[in-house]
Amino acid sequence: MIEIDGSFGEGGGQILRTSLSLSALTGQPFRLTRIRAGRPRPGLMRQHLTAVEAAAAICGAETSGAAVGSDALTFAPSAVRGGNYRFAIGSAGSTTLVLQTVLLPLLLRAGEASRLVIEGGTHNPYAPPFDFIEKVYLPLLRRMGAPVGATLERHGFYPAGGGRLRVTIAPVPKLSALELVARGACLERHAVALSSAVRPSVGRDEAEQVARLLGWPDSCAQSRQVQSPGPGNVAFAWVRHEQLDELFTAFGGPGVSREAVAQRAADQMRRYLETGAVAGPYLADQLLVPLALAGSGRFRTLAPTAHTATNIEMIKRFLPVAFRVSEACGDTVEIEVQS
């Protein structure tokens, strides 16, 4: 039984999600205490409980402490099973975090293909939006040999949620290594705003301002009205290079001006483009588990965040891999996974 203190490092939900996926994959049970001790509302929230229930359903795990508000959880996995699954978070909790950090790693190792429906939040300021998963994360997984497809059937903006994803996953014996040490030439760039039950002029202004702040042509700006159970607004800057895409978002809301939204999205993209980083800070954290499962790989990014450092230590609790973090050039570092 692996004992884990949930207050370790940044003390958030990533500790739980990484533990769930790697426990199920390796067959090693764990006990997690002080869950999300580093957060204003500690313990399991609805989206975390959904992750526990989803992982348990897929690997036939026995659990103790799986309840909203619980600050301790025991998880003892059995065999991973593919198939058809449907999970409803029942709030605006992130569907993409449950998919990305729990379900995908498990079902890529299942003995049969899987089809998932996940309902909840798809555009949540505290998690990667579906656009990031679709345009940045899944293309890299497919390069590693993982045949995964995802469709957004309904947007679910925070706080109402109510979105729906449909995902298909074919198993692979092992992921291939991935190296991201240079971006390559820039192929496309877009400033995009999505809105639901918000005046069309809001999204149009945000997209145009993001493009203008980044010095991009007006033709790069586009806005779109979408259907969602509740109102919402997000702007993102998205750039495609030869080796990967990157995307940075900013959410609108009550009391947040369209100028502030555009500025946040543009500032994140500008910082990324002005460095030699290949993977942005969010992607860097999300690449760690796939590369660890592949057994090797490397990428260049900015100085690791506390989130990334915590995730590295969690992975090492379950898998016999080492991480080497070294200075690359300028203000970037190279993170390498070695088995």
Image (cartoon, rainbow, N blue to C red):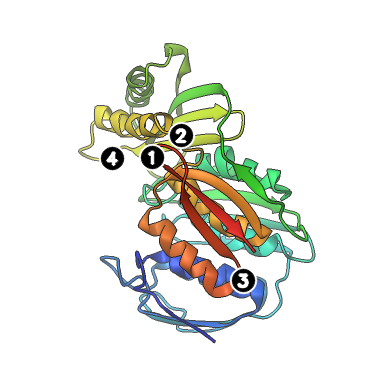
Q: Earlier in the sequence, mark 1 or mark 4?
A: 4
Q: Are marks 3 and 1 in contact (CB under 8 Å)?
A: no
Give the residue drawn at x 74%, y 65%.
110
Give the Cα distance between marks 3 and 1.
Answer: 29 Å
Q: Earlier in the sequence, mark 2 or mark 1?
A: 2
Give the Cα distance between marks 2 and 1.
Answer: 7 Å
Give the residue drawn at x 65%, y 51%.
167
Q: Are marks 3 and 4 in contact (CB under 8 Å)?
A: no
List the residue tagged with mark 1: 331
Above or below for 238 versus 70: above
Q: Of the numbered discs in the image, which one, if any, rests on residue 320?
A: 3
Q: Earlier in the sequence, mark 4 or mark 2?
A: 4
Q: Secondary structure at mark 4?
A: loop
Residue 72 % position (x, y): 40, 82
List the residue tagged with mark 4: 253
Above or below for 16 versus 209: below
Q: Are marks 3 and 2 in contact (CB under 8 Å)?
A: no
Give the Cα distance between marks 1 and 4.
Answer: 33 Å
List the residue tagged with mark 2: 276
Residue 50 visible in this rendered orientation of the protein: no
Give the Cα distance between marks 4 and 2.
Answer: 33 Å
Looking at the image, residue 77 sits to the left or right of residue 79; the answer is left
Give the Cα distance between marks 3 and 2.
Answer: 30 Å
Q: Earlier in the sequence, mark 3 or mark 2?
A: 2
Q: Give the amino acid type for the residue marked by disc 4 in the picture.
A: Gly
